[in-house]
Image (cartoon, rainbow, N blue to C red):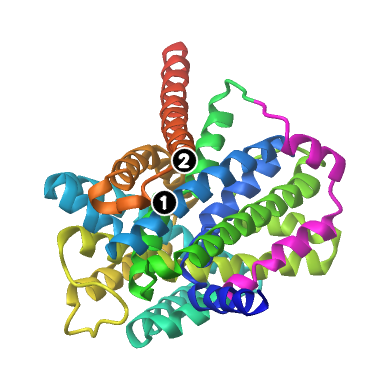
Amino acid sequence: MLKRFRYHVAVFFSVIGPGFITAVVDNDAGGIFTYSEAGARWGYLPLWTLLPITVLLIVTQEMCSRMGAVTGKGLSDLIREEFGLRTTFFMMAALLLANLTNVMANFAGVASSLELFHVSRYISVPLAAIAVSFLVVKGSYDRIEKIFLFACSLYVCYIISGILVKPDWKSAMFNSVRPVLLFDPSYITMLIGMVGTSVAPWMQFYLQAAVVEKGIGEKEYAESRVEVIVGCIVMSVIAFFIIVACAGAIWAERPRNIRDATDAALALKPFGEYAYLLFCAGLFNASLFAACILPLSTAYTICEGLGFPSGVNQRLRDARIFYYLFGFLVIVGAGVILLPNFPLVKMILFSQVLNGVLLPFVLIFMILLVNKKRLMKEWTNPAWYNLVAWASVVIMIGLTVALLGITVRDLSRT
């Protein structure tokens, strides 16, 4: 029995990477801003969303991991093969728009986190873009994955920072299990944004592509599934501490909107220099990390969907479109941040809400694919997986329609 346990542990550490990295990097600059805004504006009230979000994240990530292990193909590949090039093209165009705004948000996170230490964005952003490009173009998948896993470990900064604030733990625990739905446009926008940033469409495409490139098959899938679940739980724990830190530091003093994630970091200064520095360090790490992952995810998604060679194990001459697209996203994402008077905060919020609006459509394709016996054989979804996934589709569409309805009503009154 001990020998079998050692075997499973060895296999687990051999497959760790895709699921853990995908879930943890979801707490990028846009995500940190969204969670910080939720805590600063609504206090501990939004914490109840993290439990259903975690369940949804586990279900969606596990489905993608399973499809990648069983079929050996990325999600874009499967959508193109099963639903046609036209459907794939429109899906890729929408994802490109959403992901480009997310890339901009993460370079903005790099700039704003280092500006707190008096480093100009005209220095930090170009250097970050060069570092990100060098890592992907010159690295192999194994080397890049090791760097990404190290970056994941630095997210502990948010947990320590949240503890140092000394929030109202009793209120935090109570609100974590008490659902509250308010028919307020800003509250519904916040809910959609939280789901959109926690279960972002890009994650599904990146995870499945990474599982395929790492070579995880049916034999290693059991351990890969554990890795996915652990990553999803860690993501939600980090989100929890970001919300409670901002609820304790900002909302408890005066509920308000914040301009960006650095606003949240500055609010932690009265609670000690370490709380402030750790939040800043976490923001820089998350922003740089995601500024690498998001362009990579987009390049994977579009190249797979349109049938071009993709993957960091490919040479530049063999996958030119993949690397050119990656470079385009990095250059545009970094370049926009250097423009004066760019409405960055509005764009960050827009990108997270856009993620939430797109998610139901990505989920529909995933559910249809994972239930095809011709593709998945005995690995199709259990009934309760389908129930959670379809319920999430209905809820997200319902929230989007409610937001549109309330917005139109308010506009008609003005």
Q: Which residue is most to the top?
A: 413
Q: Are marks 2 and 1 in contact (CB under 8 Å)?
A: yes
Residue 144, by quadrant, is: bottom left
Percent across and percent down for residue 115 are: 60, 69
Percent across and percent down for residue 16 are: 52, 72
Q: Residue at x 72, y 58 (%)?
A: 266
Dominant SS type (magenta): helix
Give the camera-side residue of 262 and 219. 219
Whether the magenta-drawn stretch holds residue 29 is answered as: no
- What amino acid is found at the position of numbered circle 1 in the picture? Met
Distance between the alpha carbons at the discs numbered 2 and 1: 9 Å
Q: Which residue is most to the bottom?
A: 138
State the residue position of label 2. 385
Quarter of the figure that contains the N terminus = bottom right
Span of residues in magenta: 151-180
State the residue position of label 1. 63
